[in-house]
Image: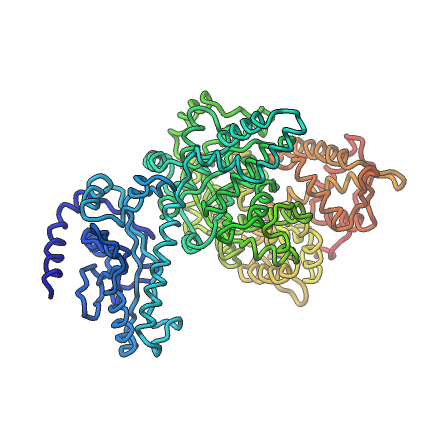
Amino acid sequence: MSIADSISRFALSLFKAPLHWLVKAHHVPNDPKQELNLNKNDKLIYVLRTKSISSIAILKRQSKMLDLPLAHYYHDNEVPDSGSCLFINNRPKWLSDRRKLTAHKTAFKQLLEAQKHNPEEDYKLVPVSIYWGRNPGKEKSFFRYLMSNLEETGRLGKLLIILFLGRQCFIQYGKPIRLNSNAIDLEQDPTKTAHKLSRILRVYFNRHWVAVMGPRSENRRALISGIVNSSPVQQVIVEEAARTNKSMAKVRKDAEKYVKEIAANYSPRTVRFLSNSLTRLWNKIYSGIEVNNIKQVRELAQDHELIYVPCHRSHTDYLLLSYQLYHEGLAPPHIAAGINLNFWPIGPILRKGGAFFLRRTFKGNKVYTAVFNEYLYRLLNKGTPVEYFQEGGRSRTGRLLSPKTGMLGMTVQGMLRGVRKPIIFIPVYIGYEKMFEGKSYVGELRGQAKKQESFGQLLGVRKALKRFYGKVYLNFGEPLRLTDYLDERVADWRQYQNSEQKPDWLNQQMLHLGDEINRRINACVSINSVSLVSMALLGTPRQAMDKGELITQLDALLAFAKAAPYSRYTNICEESGKDLVETTIKLGMAYETSDPAGNVISIEGDERVLSTYYSNNILHLFAIPSLIASLFQRHNHIAKEKIFEYIETFYPFLQKELYIHWNRETLKDRVNTLLKTMLDQGLLNMGSKNYCVPHSDTPQWIRLMSLAEVIQPALQRYAISLTLLESIDENTSIRRVELEQESQKLAQRISALYGINAPEFSDKNLFKNQIKVLKEEGYIHHREGYGIKPTDKSDELYRKILNVLSIPVQQGLQLAARSLKTSKTEVKKEPLQENQ
């Protein structure tokens, strides 16, 4: 052992005690052994970016805590043993620019030779990044640049850092490089392979730094000047000055004002303050935040421009997502927030936390549009992660809203101009067992005006934050690479690259892209206690059920969801039906009533409307199984071909409404899987030729009928529009707007007559989408200005819809239509099979 090694080991022992008190290290992933497949018995070699005694001491403490090989100093000219620490760079030295080390290459060479001669061993190089604070620094600030490169500082600098930033230490374990993998040729010259490994790790550390810290922020004055002086904005300024007879200086001043109104003013100090504050808040109101599929996001963040596209259910959505990304070792995204949130004191805080603000409409303001486009392009080109809600606003029904395509279009146009990294969309599902806005949503659904966000409203939130809201689920879905999407959908899109011209295909493709992202969000949904209990109870006439029967029904639904999973990204809770009931009662979303024959679980009051909201979160998971079950409500046995026929008829409506992700080519396979699962669980029996229902005295028959009720409101809504279409005389037509309005009125009457609590049952937008599908599928003729007329196909659709509705519902449709004087038609029925 050399003298230098002895001194280093002695210094390491001296550092042990003070570091224990001064440094509090947070590591990512939370369980490196499981996520990265690390084993204490493997030959793990830690690779760090910069040589530092304190880094070894901190890593040693961490490895002991995680039950991994203890980190220790590597002695040159020896084969590294498990736990050895290798360094890529040396610490900075006065009057010297020699930073690169070569000892690690020698160690790599020795490890490659050892792996070759000992194939039974599993040598792994584990990249470990240690950060002090999360400040990326400014682009043109020398002091901030030095402070942001905290890992690269010398001994005196590191001492100051430990003293002032020791409690902000952050350690990230990277994906290990296995020396016995097929990617490494052990027969090749080990010197060349060692040099290649060194280069790969250098690139990894550089990219990883940006993924964790984010790109360096631009001075605000330089940002404003850069945007206003950019070619696209300057062109619009000249055109606007000529059009309005304003001076160039006046239009330029307006453009500068718009930049100040829009642009974020990211502050790492504010983000750290929010992180600490939100930690205390989340611990108080939530029982935990469950995160799924984050590993893929970490890997993509290193060499992609990430666009997070979450569903929007609550004002806490953007706080939760940014908070969790920050604690998962990723740079918090810049968030597109509505201008309604830019009020004191929330607006300035959100702006410093990474929010940039946009108006509800850009219409008629070309300067504002050009400024916003340029700002978004600069974010994308710098590699800043971005987040926006393509639904435009919070959902009041628990379903995904139709996407607003403005931000998607601007993102695609920015990509076509040319960005440094490939753009990839990350769908995100954010689910709550209980939302603190629930009461206000009930009021809005009953006709109350939405309250404008203000400081006064903020003060009123204090009471809501004193309650308990259960668990939050944050699931990341299947990523969507923008270039792959365009390659599949638009053959000639590349001819628009490096161009500011708007493609003629942009608007239509953005509608499809928004729908595809919604489908991927729905594919990564979580089944939680309140959503599943709500679905089960809403399927009963009075939203009440015997506790034992409810638990059995919940266990059956969970088993069904696991046996026929909707998607590999779907998260199904591991709790039992009994646990789900207890959690729902604890959250005040259901009530237990004592009864000698058995306790009863019920939903009462405002919770009935809210239960529909939570049930809608997972409605798409059970839509097709429920549709299959609906076919057996009035028929005891049905041929398989007839089941396929009815599913294929109704599927376009369900897919459009619920963003179900199967296409028509894979639908048949899905139906086969569901039928097999229903047979396995006894929900259906197989006769000589047809599928049959269980005996009505069995629990399986009760579960089948309860499952059928899940999709009934949607089928009833389809029947409403078709009932109105059937009333049209052959020589007349009905305007689209009139059909939407009359459908809405009829739905409201049906809802009042039959006590339907679903807030979306009379949603005008759903009828609008339904009419769009009727036109696409050829059930109606529609030309703007000429009205709507049903085709011959609509009669067949109407008969099939009525065939899966109960007789009382059919009669109710007829009576309600007559009361509105819109229908004189008689109910028609096409039997599937004679009842046994």
Question: 64 left or right of 17?
Answer: right
Of 713 and 228, which appears nearest the observer?
A: 228
Which residue ends up furthest to the front in the rendered image?
A: 95
Q: Residue at x 47, y 53 (%)?
A: 304
Quarter of the rendering containing residue 761: top right
The vertical placement of 701 against 448, above or below, is below
Question: Quick check: can you spot residue 362?
Answer: no
Of 364 and 82, which appears nearest the observer?
A: 364
Q: Residue at x 40, y 25 (%)?
A: 463
The vertical placement of 70 against 240, above or below, is below
Which residue ends up furthest to the top in the rendered image?
A: 456
Residue 746 x %, y %: 72, 33
Quarter of the image for the C terminus: give it.
Answer: bottom right
Residue 503 x %, y %: 66, 48
Quarter of the rendering containing residue 217: top left
Which residue ends up furthest to the right in the rendered image?
A: 731
For the image, the number of numbered tags is 0
Question: Quick check: can you spot residue 132?
Answer: yes
Quarter of the rendering containing residue 609: top right
The vertical placement of 230 against 831, above or below, is above
Quarter of the image for the N terminus: give it.
Answer: bottom left
Residue 719 x %, y %: 72, 43
Q: Residue at x 42, y 25 (%)?
A: 345
Of 599 and 670, which appears nearest the observer?
A: 670
Question: 399 left or right of 219?
Answer: right
Question: 49 left or right of 207?
Answer: left
Q: Colour scheme in the image? A: rainbow
